[in-house]
Image (cartoon, rainbow, N blue to C red):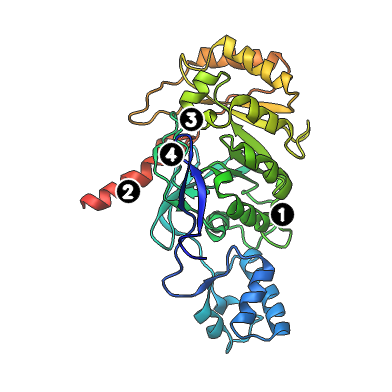
Amino acid sequence: MSADTNLMPIPGAVDPVPVPRGASARADGRIELVGLPRERIREELETAGLEPRQAKLRAKQIWHWIYNRGVGDFNAMSDIAKAQRPWFAARFAISRPEVVEAQVSTDGTRKWLLKTHDGHEFEMVFIPDADRGTLCVSSQVGCTLNCRFCHTGTMALVRNLEPQEIVGQVMLARDALGEWPSQPEGRMLTNIVMMGMGEPLYNFDNVRDALKIVMDGDGLGLSKRRITLSTSGVVPMMARAGEEIGVNLAVSLHAVTKDVRDEIVPLNRKYGIDQLLEACAAYPGANNARRITFEYVMLKDKNDSDADARELVRLIRQYRLPAKVNLIPFNPWPGAGYECSTDERIRSFSNIVFEAGISAPVRTPRGRDIDAACGQLKTSAERKRKSRETA
């Protein structure tokens, strides 16, 4: 597809503007197999010269080595003839994003600064808990939504991440945790949240294709019930996400009035609260067993009053939403125009929602000392870049 036609609408502060959609080709000319569905791998092998039956067999073997064994080198694929392995290696790649830096917080949270093959940097975070481990995955390099409280949202959008770069984050985490061969029981990485850099629904096709591989029982094998996609409210894409991906939905709500949400989540000026909640009510598969999560960052004297809490309850009841609310203490960053609500105010807000029969836990900030907490996925990437520029 030519550069002129390979465009997609991405919103600026309010209205869509066209930006380049994808990455450039690999400099070495090889075809990246990570992120391709099995049928596409077979087609690429055929195009490269394998006869159809051989291509089908090799595609099945390669898929198993990539996603069940975590292998990135054709020389490690013992059921492919040794003499044939250089032929594959010359034409195809099995790669992960490059690790620029890996950090570990005092609370065990891990953060990776990663680089794409064409030199763009982004981040992912792994949050361990006693009974689960959650990987926070990025969908774009940068972000375009300009949410006022979010440091990541102040970055310019560089480009969408390709399926291999999204799947590659999960594979990198498996590498770091020593979780190959892939197995469903006893692993630390149990959950995925599409809550890293970017708005997943503005990179819909790539996110969908990547998550299908992550959820494939013969692929990385994570259940769709253990994957959550977070959106700031891209209303036209929400039904498609439910139908074509089918994972849990989280919505970055953060305010219950038009004026406040217009300020802190500018996308609200395009898709208002009522439109957003109607789309939530229609989300395929949402029920009391699979509730929609509303993320709500607590900003002092902005969205944290008892009246705000009661309005949140009223809206959830009005739209009959199977919902839970995650209250997120604001994570400060240099230049932020907001402060975190007091502990007392957060408790009061939470109690009002809980007393209405709606779960409203307060999320414990994780990884603040390495800038890995919610809304902070910009700081270290920017700091690293600036240090290299001044070195």
Looking at the rendered structure, the kind of residue marked 2 is: Lys
Of circles 3 and 2, which is in front?
A: 3
Question: Can residue 62 be spotted in the picture?
Answer: no
Alpha carbon separation for disc pair 3 and 2: 29 Å
User: Which residue is denoted by mark 3 in the rendering?
Assistant: 266
Q: Which x, y percent locates residue 319?
A: 73, 23
Looking at the rendered structure, the kind of residue marked 4 is: Thr
**Above-or-below relation of 332 to 260:** below
Alpha carbon separation for disc pair 3 and 4: 14 Å
User: Which residue is denoted by mark 2 in the rendering?
Assistant: 384
Q: Quadrant of residue 77?
A: bottom right
Alpha carbon separation for disc pair 3 and 1: 40 Å
User: Which residue is denoted by mark 4 in the rendering?
Assistant: 152
Q: Which mark sits nearer the N-terminus, 2 or 1?
A: 1
Q: Which mark sits nearer the N-terminus, 3 or 4?
A: 4
Say which element carries label 1: loop
